[in-house]
Amino acid sequence: MRKDISVALFEDNYLLRDSYFQLINGTPGFTCVGAFDSAADIIFKIKRSEPDVILMDIDMPGMNGIEAVQIIKQNFSSIYIIMQTVFEDDDKIFNAIQAGADGYILKKTPPAKILESITEVYDGGAPMTPSIAAKTLQLFRFGIKPMQDKKDAQLTDRQKEILEGIVSGMSYKMLAEKLSLSIDTIRYHVKNIYEILQVHSRFELMKQRK
């Protein structure tokens, strides 16, 4: 039998935080191991709660969610992080992905979809919207110089093809049929695209510190 997915919440709105807590704890297969109103003392909070997945608010007082993601990924690389945002602010979401986020949801997302997103990320998925796919393509076409010593920070032709399909509004199922691949293979490529964005972001950060 599969163990419960343990989830920690970082959300400064009490009513929303409580509704997430009730949803997760009230659903078989999920356990809420922590509900926090800020990212202060975040390493202590993560060590104490030991979550598999974190729902992280992008906009919080003090340390924001993007900064929190960077700290979590530097210290707890195996934890999956889903960003929460009130509206689809492409720049913030893109920055969160580069910082290490594994996915994102809008706060108006229906409860069943929230639970589905937690499960999908926990199982290695990484959903991507057309707007984020377009930003990714634009970044690699116009904003990134080839890194000869960082081959894992470049997109393959197949990954570009998948991004172009997502930009045009194709679902994973439609892409799989068009490219004669399985849906799981499409998910695998999208997950790798997220990781490439994160590798590039870390590489650029290291260059800036030199």
Image (spheres, rainbow, N blue to C red):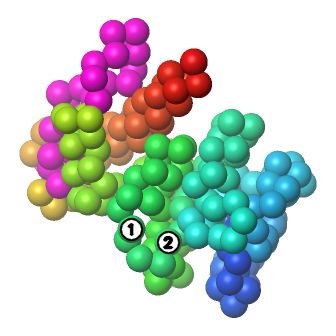
Q: Marks 2 and 1: CB-CB under 8 Å? A: yes
- Seen at 27% across and 40% down, the residue is 139
Residue 167's image quarter? bottom left
Where 72 falls versus 167 (above or below)?
A: above
Instruction: Assess whether residue 159 is covered by the magenta stretch.
Output: yes
**Percent position of residue 52, x then y:** 70, 52
Residue at the disc numbered 2: 85
The amino acid pointed to by label 2 is Thr
Q: In the rendered structure, which segment of residues is drawn in magenta?
A: 144-167
Where 144 falls versus 59 (above or below)?
A: above
Task: Choose between 8 and 177: the one closer to the eye.
Answer: 8
Residue at the disc numbered 1: 89
Task: Choose between 23 and 129: the one closer to the eye.
Answer: 129
Q: Is residue 79 left or right of residue 91?
A: right
Question: Does residue 38 show up?
Answer: yes
The amino acid pointed to by label 1 is Asp
